[in-house]
């Protein structure tokens, strides 16, 4: 089985990265917006710890996704008008950049408050940074701004995908869902 992308479709590794990534990002956005609306207390603390655990586990996944995207070539652009191809590419790139901004600011926000990141009590990575209220605040602002940018970009991305999916059906969805016989 061919693992890399082919000229006509994303390969199994890119598809796995995309759909697991989409699930994690949507879960992280929902969790982040939910717990940050709660008053301080045990419930907020529980959801916050879960958010940080999933965020910590996402770090190697996103790093691998970006390395794979650079190494696996990517299929040829679909036969859409040039402006749509440029917009789709711009939105894909901006989503990946917003994702990197979310992960970096999330980690640095914790570390500038001298708090560890990690996965509950299973893995704890202590802060290597000196405490800084100013930088903690800046990273919290970046985290919130990047979250709203990401929400806007995902909305554009899903609307674009639905438009092309409705117009072209399987020929379009097959690129990210798998086209039997074309891998
Ligand atoms: C849940 C609804 C989603 C649907 C229906 C969807 C659908 C698709 C489709 C069909 C493609 C292939 C476009 C092409 O053929 O050129 C694609 C690519 C892509 N999507 Fe999504 N997507 C969704 C969510 C997301 C989310 C939440 C993210 C990121 C945070 C994302 C990031 C990307 C990226 C970066 C690409 C380019 C290929 C890659 O590098 O993985 N998508 N998406
Ligand atoms: C896909 C990556 C991520 C997404 C989509 C995401 C999303 C969000 C959102 C939407 C909020 C609420 C922002 C607000 O309105 O103030 C939030 C808050 C927060 N996130 Fe993330 N996050 C991600 C990664 C991380 C990581 C990796 C960490 C740390 C390891 C982290 C730590 C936090 C913390 C501590 C807050 C609370 C900020 C506060 O107390 O106001 N996040 N996140």
Image: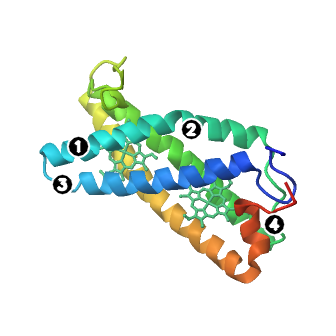
| Residue lying at 27% horizontally and 23% vertically, measured from the top left | 114
Q: Are marks 2 and 3 in contact (CB under 8 Å)?
A: no
Disc 3 marks which residue? 38
What crowding class fits label 2: few (fewer than 14 Cα within 10 Å), some (14-19), or many (20 or more)? some
Q: Nearer the viewer, mark 2 or mark 3?
A: 2
Residue 118: quadrant of the picture: top left
Disc 4 marks which residue? 78
Q: Quadrant of ligand 1?
A: bottom right
Q: CA distance from mark 2 to mark 1?
A: 23 Å
Q: Nearer the viewer, mark 1 or mark 3?
A: 1
Q: CA distance from mark 4 to mark 1?
A: 44 Å
- Of the two numbered discs 2 and 3 on the same chain, state the one appearing first in sequence: 3
Q: CA distance from mark 4 to mark 2?
A: 27 Å
Q: Are marks 4 and 2 in contact (CB under 8 Å)?
A: no
Front residue of 131/107: it is: 107
- Of the two numbered discs 4 and 2 on the same chain, state the one appearing first in sequence: 2
Under tag 2, what secondary structure? helix
């Amino acid at each position: 089985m061919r693992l890399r992308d082919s000229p006509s479709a994303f390969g199994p590794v890119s598809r796995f990265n995309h759909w697991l990534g989409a699930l994690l990002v949507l879960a992280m956005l929902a969790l982040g917006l939910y717990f940050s609306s709660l008053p301080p207390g045990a419930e907020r603390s529980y959801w916050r710890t879960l958010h940080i655990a999933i965020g910590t586990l996402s770090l190697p996944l996103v790093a691998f996704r970006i390395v794979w995207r650079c190494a696996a070539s990517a299929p040829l652009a679909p036969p859409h008008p040039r402006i749509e191809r440029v917009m789709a590419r711009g939105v894909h790139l901006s989503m990946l950049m917003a994702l990197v901004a979310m992960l970096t600011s999330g980690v640095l926000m914790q570390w500038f408050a001298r708090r560890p990141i990690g996965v509950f009590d299973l893995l704890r990575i202590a802060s290597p940074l000196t405490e800084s209220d100013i930088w903690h605040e800046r990273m919290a602002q970046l985290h919130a701004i990047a979250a709203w940018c990401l929400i806007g970009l995902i909305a554009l991305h899903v609307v674009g995908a639905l438009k092309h999916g409705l117009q072209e059906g399987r020929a379009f969805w097959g690129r990210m869902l798998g086209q039997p016989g074309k891998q």
